[in-house]
Amino acid sequence: MKLVSLGSPALALELTLNSGQAFHWLREGHGWVGAIGETAVYLEQRAGELFVNLGAELAATNYLALDHPLGEIEASFPKDPVSQEALAFCRGMRILRQPKWEALATFITSSMKQVSHIAQISHTLRQRFGSAHVLNHKPVYSYPTPEALAALQEADLRKCALGYRAANLLATARKVASKEVDLDSIAVLPDPEAQMALRALPGVGEKVANCALLFGFERLKAFPVDVWIERVIRERYFTKRQKATPAAIRTFCATNFGPYGGYAQQYLFHHARLTWKKG
């Protein structure tokens, strides 16, 4: 496998791929293997220099969002101790620019699941219903298209450990495959309208819509509030005298973190997930 250098961008590759944004990248030697759309990709970072397999340069550059002004983004974080702790822990993490359908579908399957469980579901769906590619003599699987999932029955998806999420994923896939819902049209809507359009889909509430907007539609202000973020905001930003209702937390998150709030959210999420478990 021939590798091509993409230079030495400001990027913490392992941190980015393993931070709960995407769920299918696997360790392979000194690097990582996965699929970006229908392109099989190997990524490796050596002393800051980024390498990718020949032919996947454009896909990797776009997916890793190497054009995001990371220095400006990290400098925009609030100067409070909580945000700065997360920044120090996650410096160099980028928000991936994932395919819209893949991001939406993956987070529909993520409801009430831990990262490891979401990854298991993603790999199972890819292997059973996605396209197979060969990279360095090994198979790599793309995420199944809406059309591939729309042709299935709910029972097929329940066999992938989806539980009640199977009905939601299937119904949404059928809406997208039939063109009843056009994700490209949603992509050009203003943030509030785009969120409303996504929330009209089965299995898409406020958190899933914001995840799809952030990771698939590149709305970098979108601020998903999951149990980790709610705990961080409630315990570290609100005093005992303040009422940390879900509505108050959502309002705080939407107004406190600026135009790159999605980046701040991901840093706070990953920092809390890896450090709070250890006390």
Image (cartoon, rainbow, N blue to C red):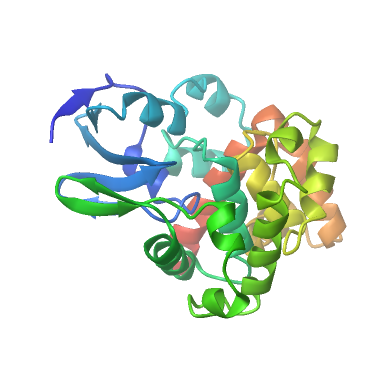
| Coordinates of residue 225 in the picture (x, y in percent) | 69, 55
Rendered-image quadrant of the N terminus: top left
> Which is more toward the observer, 131 or 249?
131
Question: Residue, x 65% and y 78% (percent of image)?
Answer: 164
Q: Is residue 244 visible?
A: no
Q: Is residue 117 visible?
A: yes
Number of numbered discs overlaid on the protein picture: 0
Up-down relation of residue 62 to residue 125 (above or below): above
| Coordinates of residue 119 in the picture (x, y in percent) | 43, 63
Up-down relation of residue 137 to residue 261 (above or below): below
> Which is more toward the observer, 104 or 274?
104
Question: Residue, x 39% and y 55% (percent of image)?
Answer: 24
Question: Residue, x 49% and y 24% (percent of image)?
Answer: 70
Quadrant of the rendered structure where residue 220 is?
top right
Up-down relation of residue 158 to residue 32 (above or below): below
Decide if residue 212 is on the left or right side of residue 10: right
> Which is more toward the observer, 140 or 29?
140
Question: Residue, x 75% and y 28% (percent of image)?
Answer: 188
| Coordinates of residue 18 in the picture (x, y in percent) | 39, 51
Quadrant of the rendered structure where residue 239 is?
bottom right
| Coordinates of residue 14 in the picture (x, y in percent) | 32, 44
Decide if residue 131 is on the left or right side of residue 51: right
Decide if residue 276 is on the left or right side of residue 6: right
> Which is more toward the observer, 188 or 252?
188
Up-down relation of residue 167 to residue 219 (above or below): below
